[in-house]
Amino acid sequence: MLESRPESGFFDHYLESYRTLGRKIYGSRNSLNIGSTDLSKYITSNFREWDEEALRRGLPEFASKATPTPAAQEIRLALAESLLRQGKAEEATKVLCEATAIKQLDSAGDVSQVFWMAELEWRAGNAASSFALLREALELADSDQILPGLIGAQEEERGFSSLHILHTLIFRLNLMGRKEETAQAWAKAAPLIAARRDRKPFVIHLTTSDLEFDLDTRFCALAITD
């Protein structure tokens, strides 16, 4: 839990603590799973329960339709996730490239699929692509009336919120040592935290543990001014 302090340099000290914590939990920055989100907490697709063989059989059926369907894209992402889990990074990257090409045809966008894709790009070692997709997911969440991300813990318990996406981005930017981008993301998070109707801790569900943060608006002000 974090306690807000007014001392000069506290924000930089916090970021370094944040980074050290991540390295301690995951052991190595070279690990593909460092900072990975527990997708079961956020992605409800039943295709994630299918094995690789079933996914490969099912994809042609859904992909053969004249209009791209959400189901076909879900199968692609579930297949890429399965391949990454088996250590087949090269095959997974090919599937992700196909999913990216299909995503560009979807003008509406789906925040859950974009977040899912961002997670898979991260696991595949493509940090820049993951950051870009997280920012895209954030834009979609901000514009989606169903996912305002401003209500607080109750909204977060249902899955995505702008604040959850931002904290995922912040956590990973900091792990990569991108201080300026991390500070910019914290500045964007400050008004979301201020809009919360409760002071319940915020939880990020990671693959190996849950990280719990005491979100203090006074601390977020430091992120803007430092």
Image (cartoon, helix red, strand yellow):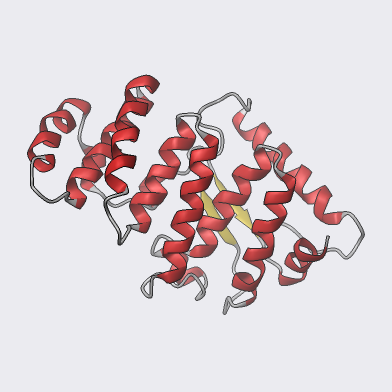
Is residue 151 shown left or right of residue 3? left
> Does residue 64 sit above or below 200 in this rendering?
above
User: Residue 185 occupies which quadrant of the picture?
Assistant: bottom right
Q: Quadrant of the N terminus?
A: bottom right
* Left or right of residue 20: residue 192: left
Residue 155, by quadrant, is bottom left
In this rendering, is residue 162 above or below 121? Answer: below
Q: Is residue 216 left or right of residue 37?
A: right
Query: Looking at the image, which is closer to me, 142 or 9?
Result: 142
Image coordinates for residue 160, horizontal then vertical, percent: 42, 60
Against 195, residue 222 (above or below) is above
* Quadrant of the image containing the C terminus: bottom right
Residue drawn at 8 percent across, 48 percent down: 66
Please name whichever residue, 155 or 138, is drawn nearer the observer in this view of the structure. 138
* Residue ranking furthest to the right: 8
Query: Residue 108, relative to residue 100: is it above or below?
Result: below
Residue 116, percent from left and from top:
38, 46
Q: Can residue 170 be seen in the rendering of this structure?
A: yes
Q: Which residue is at the front of the view, 138 or 31?
A: 138
Which residue is pictured at 67% across the width and 33% down the height?
Answer: 23
**Residue under the image location 27 percent in, 50 percent down:** 105
